[in-house]
Image: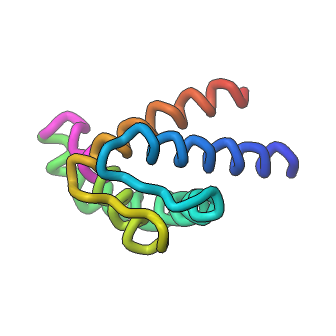
Amino acid sequence: MLKIIVKWIVFALMIMLVGWLTPGVTIANFLTAMIAVIVIALINAFIKPVLLLLTLPLNILTLGLFTVVINALLFMFTAYLVPGINVDGFLSALLASVLISILSIGLSKIGE
């Protein structure tokens, strides 16, 4: 249980870092980032698999690169759902989602 809470806090700090590094993405405060982590987890658990299945032909055609676009759109959806997160446009969401993906891979490697 403690490991899950620590990962949640570290992921929220990571979201704050991405908001600080990415031009066009603002995160209001740490509580907003904590809520965003929950929303991102729920979106990745329920909506993302359905979208990946629906866009499978396009994903195969682009050799999986369309997944990056889906991640950016889901990050924009998270910003729409969570008050206190502002994303200026698609390119900002694309850069933020790539940073989040890279940092979360690093976080999962540290947690092993």
Q: Is residue 39 above or below residue 106?
A: below
Q: Nearer the viewer, residue 30 or 55?
A: 30
Could you tell me how many numbered marks the image carries? 0
Q: How is the image coloured?
A: rainbow
Q: Kindly give the residue lying farthest to the right in the view shown.
A: 2
Magenta span covers which residues? 62-70
Is residue 67 among the parts visible in the rendering? no
Residue 28 falls inside the magenta stretch: no
* Relative image position of residue 78 (x, y in whole percent): 42, 65
Q: Nearer the viewer, residue 104 or 58?
A: 104
Q: Nearer the viewer, residue 50 or 94?
A: 94
Q: Is residue 86 above or below residue 21?
A: below
Residue at the image position 15 percent from the left and 49 percent from the top: 58
Image quadrant in which you'd find residue 108: top right
Residue at the image position 47 percent from the left and 64 percent from the top: 43
- 69 lies left or right of 46: left
Quarter of the figure with the C terminus? top right
Residue at the image position 87 percent from the left and 47 percent from the top: 2
* Relative image position of residue 76 (x, y in whole percent): 33, 61
Is residue 89 among the parts visible in the rendering? yes
* Relative image position of residue 1 (x, y in whole percent): 86, 51
Residue 65 falls inside the magenta stretch: yes
* Relative image position of residue 16 (x, y in whole percent): 54, 47
